[in-house]
Image (cartoon, rainbow, N blue to C red):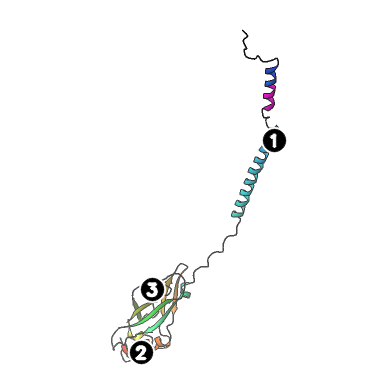
Amino acid sequence: MNAVGPVEPGENTYAQEAAAHEAAAPEPAPPARRGTRHRRTAIAAATAVALGAAGLGLYLTRPEPPPEPPPPWPSQSVSVTYTGEMSRPRAGERDFTFAVTFTQASGPPVTVRQVAQPSASLSVRTSPGPPFTVKTGTPRKLIITMHIRECGEVPRNAGLPFLEVTLRNARANERQSYILGPEYANDLSAALSAACPRTRVS
């Protein structure tokens, strides 16, 4: 009885298989290619750093925007007008009233800190009393009470007292003299003459 066993490999069979396996294995990348990839990465990083530095330089050297113009002087933005309503005192009375209006043409709010007049024989007080604020587009009406301190010294000529107003805004603190016009001068002269007749000596 013949028995057929497994076929035995011939000579050099293992050697040929090893050679075929080695031929099929991928070859490692040449050293030159690995070096090129490294150089490309380094160049890209250096370019990014250079672009970042250039951008930072442009940001730091960019021209500054021009500064905003300062607000106007308070005396340039606020006007005071005589609006009438001068009361007529009787002889011997020492107080009478009239009205003025504060108006602002433009700019930040202005604070009215004081309202006065230069004559030593007269004094004034206002309602509302200072300080108060004047804003653009919102006129403020004041009732001024004039008090006669001494009849014999009150002014009766064209040099009737003007109003001295102390104003303040974000730019400056100013003291401004406001001449209220001929109507104010005429009404004030009439009120002083009524309160202090020329024959009266205080």
118 in the magenta segment: no
Identified at 36% across, 78% down, the residue is 142
On-image quarter of the N terminus: top right
Residue where numbered disc 1 is placed: 33
Q: Position of residue 79 (x, y in %)?
A: 44, 78
> Would you say 86 lies left or right of 49 here?
left
Check disc 3 and give the amino acid type: Gln
Occupied quadrant, residue 162: bottom left
Residue where numbered disc 2 is placed: 190
Q: Residues within 10 Å of mark 2 (few under 14, many from 20)?
A: some
Q: In front: 96, or 23?
A: 23
Identified at 69% across, 38% down, the residue is 36
Main secondary-structure element of the magenta-colored stretch: helix
Occupied quadrant, residue 194: bottom left
Mark whose residue sits in front, 2 or 1: 1
Q: Secondary structure at mark 2?
A: helix
Specify the segment rendered in magenta: 18-25
